[in-house]
Amino acid sequence: MTAVKRSATQIRQDFIDFFVEQRHTFVPSSSLVPGGDQTLLFTNAGMVQFKDVFLGVDKRPYNRAANSQKCMRVAGKHNDLDDVGRDDTHHTFFEMLGNWSFGDYYKPEAIDWAWQLLTQVWGLEKGDLWATCFRDDQGDIPEDDEAAVVWRKQPGMNPDHVLFFGRKDNFWEMAETGPCGPCSEIHIDRGLKYCEKQYIPGHVCQVNGDCARFLELWNLVFIQYNRLSPTKLEPLPAKHVDTGMGFERIVSVLQDVSSNYRTDLFTPLLDSVQQMTRHSNEEREENFTPYRVIGDHSRAAAFLIADGVVPGNTGRNYVCRMIIRRAARFGGKIGLNEPFLARVAEKVIEQYGDFYPELVRNRKAILDNLTREEERFQRTVDSGVAKLESLLARLVARGERVLPGGQAFSLYATYGLPVEITRDIAREQGLDVDEPGFRQAMEEHRLASGAGEAFGPLGGEDVDIYRELMAGLEEQGKLQLQGVVYNPYEWLEVEGPLLAMVRDGKPVFAAQPGDRVELILPETGFYIESGGQVSDTGTIVAAAEPAWEMRVVDMRRPAAGIIVHVAEVVQGEPEVGRQAIARVDALRRQDIMRNHTATHLLHAELRTVLGEHARQAGSLVAPDRLRFDFTHPQAVTAEELERIEAGVNRDILGGYNLNIKIKPLQQAIGEGATALFGEKYGEIVRTITIGGTDPFSYELCGGTHVEETGDIGLFLITSEGSAAAGIRRIEAVTGRGAYELVMRRFRVLKQASDLLSAPQDEVTLKIQDLMADLGEARKQISGLKQMQAQNAMIRHLDVAAEVKGVRVLTATLDDVDAETLRAMTDRFRQRYPSGVAVLASVSPDGHPALVASVSEDLVKRGLHAGELVKHVAASLGGSGGGRPTMAQAGGKDAANLEKALASVTGWVEAHLAG
Ligand SMILES: [Zn+2]
Ligand SMILES: [Zn+2]
């Protein structure tokens, strides 16, 4: 290896600089949470953010792009977690370097540049490099000779190093149908010293072989077909290039180390672990697996939290929780029993923060979440592992090898032990876990707890019919090339011809009253739901006789440039070609705008009052209310809520103008604009700044807003609660909604004031007075009742029975509490120093209460008040107990009370000794 050792940071920059020189646009990595793609848990390849460009539903202002993309592969089809820690090449989080051509350059340039970068910029030995091209093993698709020819003529390329492989290695498909094409891979021969199988008889080191000597470095995909069916391909009119190079791998090659974990991407992280364990270098080598797991997982968790994914119970949040806990457990194996991941994450932020500033911006959230999650896990891990050990021991004793999924789930639900950790521990003992069973149990639990499905299917869009319609309209010159002109910011009313109507998925020329149709106009001011703001509604009417009217109930955008009004025909018969006037419901829109601007104020105020970690996790901007979800670990207190509400109203009354500007995404991010979680942004973004020269709110936002904050009117919070683990939800009203709420409250106050005959300001005083009076009255009633009970008691005392010379009294007193019953037994005792009394009372709701009293001398003769009262209560469907001299019980049903009391004399007779 003659290459100069470069730092990983330098290598990443080399790649980007090289392609920017070849007139590529540098496109920053998109979030780990794929924007607008419901089918993916995490961004798992560089092309994810360009998928719609290849599918033809999105257009970009550039046709060459290069980047380094953050990726996660931890669940689903691409699941590398099993291998992470066990080997030197797998990661949960990784970076993918890539360059793209969207219908621009093709194979010759892509191959030339790859060769130049590897051999000239990075100085890799030409003789070590190999290239593979596509030759169909099924004989249907033409061989990619075009690529092979270009490879063979690269300066210094050994022609024998150009090989052909079949579909498995060298044909790329996005899905069962859609864009696809041959690919060309570059492999490097790292020399015999990297072959770990050289002593295995019959082993041959080769490209696409099974040892570590040959490594695939870079995959160049040439997208030239559209797959229509398993056997049918058609050539694409525009051909694309999509390349991917694993960053960690190329760094390990250029730094000439045997493991990705021995590159400078990881060594600072692992060094920090070693400082904490105080291991010698030998001990660090002996424990390299825990070191690798900690290095990988702390890096992944830091990036996840920076993208707004905090630890939680389902979906992405579960993944974040699981990797933190798994890292914590491996830390435990090398003696790290206190939270330690924040210290490793500091190194991640240091190492990656320049290229990924979101790490620096979210530093506090990253460190706090890691430590909090480790602490949570520490509370339960020991009992969880102990429980698991005993379950595993029982399996072994029964000669079984697989832990049932239901048991794995209850370990998670009860002890917070993620199934991945359960699996680690089981495998350490040569056992396995029924993971499909775990997922099923988890799903059942999630559905049962009402959480719903995490990832719904993609909306079945009838994109094709609209694409055809649009193409026709463009050809006839009725539509501009970029499609329907959309300006919800300035137009509440537009006039234009009805270009097309679709009913039941088919284009129609005319529609009847009652029909539900979708229609296209050349321009529209109707807002399409996005960024939480709901779609506009309104009307579309004929601009001239004969009259007709449609009510717009929804808006949608099946693909870029295609905007569809979903409408119901109210009257008349609209026809394609007729001139129409489309009016947004302006009053409703005004309400929506108040709520949207208030949402920005609320977001800013939450961060001021609760801290920078309080970030948007979802929002709804509707006409009647706004709903805002944000990350915050505990309930917002009443005092905090009051400060937040007051702060927003202060900003409203400040009468700040909204400063709305269009600028490049990178500039806005650089200026500190808040980008929203899970949102997909283009190159050019709309920014909303509020607060004059020293703005307190700066967000990327495509929504519609009031002109100045004073337009919002009043802002009132109506509720605060939990939306999901670690996520709180605030609902609020503004403007007309707030006015209506205040009016409702005033009405209640006025009714109260009328009922109390007190001025409104004195209502609470008056209520306090009434409550005091009521307390006094209750006391009097209770005194009277007691007196009444005493009088009744005196009558009962006169007729107490005698059993074997012992006085026995049973009596029912009207509607008194247990306290009074006990007081009455004292009366009995005063009259009869030796004796047994059972007193009962039935409460107004029909529940009997009992008190039994036995004098000391009779206790010595074998009577026990507790047993007696239990005996009586048993036939009343109740139970009770107490001391030998005094006991108490309650019952459910008073129907048998008389009979139960009558049984007392018999009981006494039976139990009385001597
Ligand atoms: Zn080998
Ligand atoms: Zn907004």
Image (cartoon, rainbow, N blue to C red):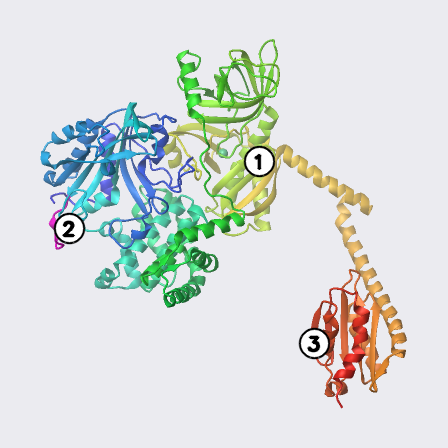
> Which percent across, then down, holds residue 760?
77, 44
Task: Please give the residue where the numbered disc 1 appears in the rendered image.
Answer: 652
**Quick one: which residue is furthest to the bottom in this view?**
914
* In the depicted structure, whether residue 756 falls above or below residue 176: below
The magenta segment is 189-203
Task: Please give the residue where the numbered disc 2 appears in the rendered image.
Answer: 194
Mark in front: 1 vs 3: 3
Residue type highlighted by circle 1:
Ile
Q: Which residue is nearer to you in this view: 275 or 134?
A: 134
Q: Quadrant of the C terminus?
A: bottom right
Circle 3 Cα neighbour tier, 10 Å, few/some/many (<14 / 14–19 / ≥20) = some
Label 2 C-beta lies within 8 Å of the nearest ligand 1 atom: yes
Q: Cα distance, mark 2 to mark 1? A: 67 Å
Task: Please give the residue where the numbered disc 3 appears in the rendered image.
Answer: 882
- Horizontally, is 895 left or right of 538 in the view? right
Label 3 C-beta lies within 8 Å of the nearest ligand 2 atom: no
* In the depicted structure, whether residue 540 falls above or below residue 379: above
Mark in front: 2 vs 1: 2
Q: Earlier in the sequence, mark 2 or mark 1?
A: 2
Q: Answer yes or no: do the residues labelled 1 and 3 have beta carbons within 8 Å? A: no
Q: Secondary structure at mark 2?
A: helix
> Which percent across, then down, holds residue 467?
41, 21
Q: Cα distance, mark 2 to mark 3? A: 81 Å
Residue 34 part of the magenta-drawn span: no
Residue at figure coordinates x 28%, y 64% from the top left? 278
Q: Earlier in the sequence, mark 1 or mark 3?
A: 1
For residue 389, say whether it is visible: yes
